[in-house]
Amino acid sequence: MSTDHCDVSTALGGAPHFAARTLALADRVTKHIALNPELGFVLGLSLVLPLLRWVLELAFYKPVATRVLRGTKQRERVTKMCESFWKMTAYGSMLALEVAITHREPWFWRPKDYWVGWPNQPELPLMRLLFFSQLAYYLSTTFTLALWEVPRSDYWVMQTHHCCTVVLIYYNYISGYQRWGCLIMMLHDINDVIMEVAKCLNYAEQHAAANATFGLFVVAWAVLRLTAFPAVLIRSTLLDSVRVLGYTPPHHGLLNALLCVLYCFHVYWFGLILQVAYMALLKGRGEDIREKED
């Protein structure tokens, strides 16, 4: 009897302490956002993006998908196509921003120049908007991945990827690694846009166009994520940064470790991509093998 009383009193006594700790944490977060107003903008945008997706889906994505798609499992394919439309919009917008930032910059083709002048490199006008948009998008996606999107077998791999991406983007921004970070985002967004186009064509049963686009996607993935990512960007971070600066920049090991984690994800996903490619060769069409059929 006394033991039960002790357990209950401990639980009840712990509740106010838990509430106090929660309020203290919320207070620290609020003060940090007040000192860094850009974080408030990012958090606000991460809440607005799902609302924008919902509006676009009702006004544009779903009517277009419903008109284009026919045959069996139409409702399921409409849902998938709407998701791909949103990702095409998001990745395409960010890719356009990245091209606008880099297309006239001389350092674009010279990896060593990513570090020249760091940490006092001038910030390009659109660079801050790019980093804030990317950060808000991946923050919102960590929630929509669980609550909104089509279930896929690589959920935890994707969720871990998004968390690593959020850390990398924020760290790049506050550390001034903006040139290098912009190119990493561009490398990823090119692949993502091509992939979503191929998926939309496949949902619409335009199999010849879908297979051609998917072939382009496989080549782009192999060239950009499996080759250029380690050979140019990781190498630049690992070696060029130390050679150009003359010292090891802060958190050098952590930054390169996160990049290696991302590269492992790229290799894992490329294995799935090759399975889809093999299926396309056998059947004349490919399917996203990560998706769970209803």
Image (cartoon, rainbow, N blue to C red):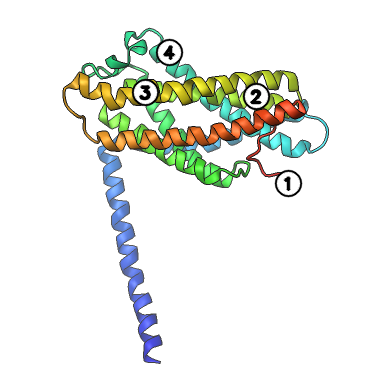
Task: Tell me whether circle 2 and circle 4 mark residues in contact (CB < 8 Å).
Answer: no
- Is residue 151 found left or right of 44 in the rendered image? right
Seen from the viewer's position, the closer of residues 157 and 166 is: 157
Would you name the residue on which mark 3 appears? 233
Crowdedness near tag 1: few (<14), some (14–19) or many (≥20) residues, C-alpha within 10 Å: few
Q: Is residue 4 above or below residue 97?
A: below
Where residue 242 appears, x then y in whole percent? 22, 24
Q: Earlier in the sequence, mark 1 or mark 4?
A: 4
Q: Looking at the picture, which amino acid does disc 1 mark?
A: Asp
Q: Is residue 205 above or below residue 141?
A: above
Q: In what element is the residue under mark 4?
A: helix
Task: Tell me whether circle 1 and circle 4 mark residues in contact (CB < 8 Å).
Answer: no
Whole-number angstrom distance, CA of label 4 to CA of label 3: 20 Å
Would you identify the image quadrant in which residue 31 lies? top left
Whole-number angstrom distance, CA of label 2 to CA of label 1: 22 Å
Q: Earlier in the sequence, mark 2 or mark 4?
A: 4
Name the disc covering residue 191, or none.
none
Q: Quick one: quadrant of the N terminus? A: bottom left
- Is residue 143 found left or right of 7 in the rendered image? right
Q: Looking at the picture, which amino acid does disc 4 mark?
A: Ala
Q: In what element is the residue under mark 1?
A: loop
Crowdedness near tag 3: few (<14), some (14–19) or many (≥20) residues, C-alpha within 10 Å: many
Where residue 255 appears, x then y in whole percent? 31, 34
Name the disc covering residue 294, or none.
1
Name the disc covering residue 100, or none.
4
User: Which residue is at a point 32% across and 52% down the rendered structure image?
Assistant: 26
